[in-house]
């Protein structure tokens, strides 16, 4: 028994060694298995990565180092890694790194994306510009008091507002702006040009202008002021002709026009002149309200999204001015909502249109406010007159064409207004 016990005692260390060796061997096996699994997982991930890259190249999915693009967003292969590559290169190598502004670079990239569409009325507005646009519609801002647009790819004065600095300095509808404070306007979007023209009250801006009658460009130095635009003015002359001038279709226009219509009915004039010259436009709903004071049946304007989809906006039943002989004045500065009104009155036989062919801004923009205070204005449709004429391509052609020349302007003569008065005097 003792021998047996001694034998057992002697064998215990050997068993421990064997067990330790087994544990070590098992550990090595597990480590090898784990390593092998890791290698397999790594290879699998690499395979998935390569498959993803192939998908990005061939299927149109987008992968970048921050987010994955939502499905079905692309019709062509686009790799957004390129955006971040350029971003990193700028941040790494630009000579004046301390001058780089992340938000300015980001907004600039979005502006470029929107501008690439080639539509001057589809624009991205960073928060500062978005606020200015909102101020415009409210009728209050600091600037020169002129609406600008783009024609033949040149920044152009659409409408200098009455009694505002631009008009007092001598600017006219149709003037081409070649430079702002000596900086060329070539390549500028409309909103970029507006941003450069505007500034604090009592500061100056110099516009380099070309006009058809000029031999060369001419500099106009204009002092900015706070522009408070009351969008409607009325007057009645000794011949009992009532004139309603609408400068914009803004926030205050509908209510002011209701008052003007009631005033016209009360004064019972022999005729009405609706002056839409140099009116750059504004709200669609307001344009429909105004036209409905004459049009008592049928369509005011058609909003066409595509050949299959369109909305027809009908009259709204008031038509308090339908029985008054009416002349509507338009010129090259009449755009957008003012063209909708002129087209509705013309096609429905409610007014004689006098002046010059309108600007031809007959596209529809929707304004989408974004979460950081910026916004995007997107062209979504075209305006058609009741008879189906495309305002954007054709403008509104007057029934009676009368120009207002520079000589007339300098002599304070208004042949367009004179023709309107002449036509109405012949009515009764």
Image (tube, rainbow, N blue to C red):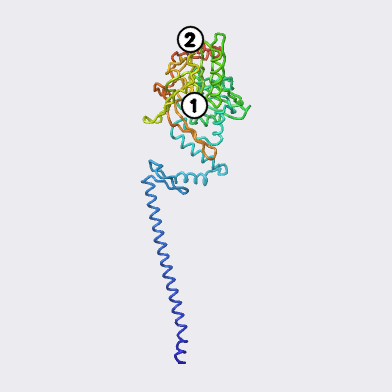
Considering every residue shown, the one lying at the far front of the view is 317
Residue that numbered label 2 is attached to: 423
x and y percent of residue 28 in the render? 43, 70
Tag shown at residue 116? none
Q: Residues within 10 Å of mark 2 (few under 14, many from 20)?
A: some
Image position of 15 with respect to 317: above or below:
below
Q: How many marks?
A: 2
Image position of 155 with respect to 419: above or below:
below
Of residues 408 and 2, the one nearer the viewer is: 2
Residue that numbered label 1 is attached to: 285
Q: Which quadrant of the structure image shows residue 136?
A: top right
Q: Nearer the viewer, mark 1 or mark 2?
A: 1
Q: Is residue 187 left or right of residue 72?
A: right
For image coordinates 46% across by 77% down, the residue present is 20
Element on which disc 2 rests: helix
Element on which disc 1 rests: helix
x and y percent of residue 319 in the render? 48, 19
Quadrant holding the N terminus:
bottom left
Instruction: Report the Cα–Cα distance between label 1 and label 2.
Output: 30 Å
Q: Residues within 10 Å of mark 1 (few under 14, many from 20)?
A: few
Of residues 219 and 188, the one nearer the viewer is: 188
- Which one is earlier in the sequence, the residue at label 1 or at label 2? 1
Q: Is residue 53 left or right of residue 101?
A: left
Considering every residue shown, the one lying at the far right of the view is 202
x and y percent of residue 314 in the render? 44, 24
x and y percent of residue 25 in the render? 42, 73
């Amino acid at each position: 028994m003792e021998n047996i016990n001694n034998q057992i005692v002697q064998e215990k260390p050997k068993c421990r060694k064997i067990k330790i060796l087994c544990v070590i061997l098992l550990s090595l096996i597990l480590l090898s298995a784990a390593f092998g699994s890791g290698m397999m997982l790594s290879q699998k991930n690499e395979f998935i990565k390569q498959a993803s890259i192939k998908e990005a190249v061939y299927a149109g999915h987008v992968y970048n180092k921050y987010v994955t693009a939502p499905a079905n967003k692309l019709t062509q292969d686009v790799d957004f890694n390129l955006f971040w590559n350029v971003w990193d290169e700028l941040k790494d190598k630009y000579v004046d790194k301390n001058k780089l502004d992340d938000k300015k670079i980001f907004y600039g990239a979005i502006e470029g994306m929107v501008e690439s569409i080639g539509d001057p009325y589809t624009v991205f507005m960073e928060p500062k510009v978005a606020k200015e646009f909102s101020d415009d519609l409210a009728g209050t801002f600091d600037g020169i008091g002129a609406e600008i647009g783009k024609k033949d790819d040149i920044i152009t004065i659409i409408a200098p507002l009455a009694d505002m600095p631009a008009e007092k300095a001598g600017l006219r509808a149709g003037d081409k702006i070649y430079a702002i404070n000596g900086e060329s306007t070539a390549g500028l979007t409309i909103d970029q040009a507006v941003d450069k023209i505007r500034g604090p009250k009592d500061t100056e801006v110099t516009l380099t202008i070309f006009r058809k009658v000029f031999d060369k460009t001419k500099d106009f130095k204009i002092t900015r002021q706070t522009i408070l635009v009351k969008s409607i003015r009325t007057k009645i002359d000794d011949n009992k002709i009532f004139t309603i001038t609408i400068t914009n279709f803004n926030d205050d226009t509908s209510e002011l026009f209701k008052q003007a219509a009631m005033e016209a009915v009360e004064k019972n004039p022999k005729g009405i002149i609706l002056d839409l010259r140099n009116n750059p436009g504004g709200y669609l709903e307001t344009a429909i309200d105004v036209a409905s004071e004459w049009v008592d049946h049928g369509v005011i304007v058609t909003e066409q999204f595509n050949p299959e989809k369109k909305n027809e906006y009908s009259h709204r039943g008031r038509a308090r001015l339908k029985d008054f002989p009416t002349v509507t004045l338009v010129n090259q500065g009449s755009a957008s909502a003012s063209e909708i009104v002129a087209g509705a009155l013309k096609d429905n036989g409610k007014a004689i249109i006098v002046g010059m062919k309108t600007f031809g801004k007959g596209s529809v923009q929707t304004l989408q406010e974004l979460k950081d205070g910026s916004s995007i204005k997107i062209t979504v449709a075209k305006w058609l007159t009741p008879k189906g004429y495309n305002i954007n391509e054709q403008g509104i052609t007057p029934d009676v064409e009368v120009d207002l020349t520079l000589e007339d302007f300098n002599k304070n003569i208004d042949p367009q207004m004179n023709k309107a008065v002449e036509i109405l005097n012949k009515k009764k």
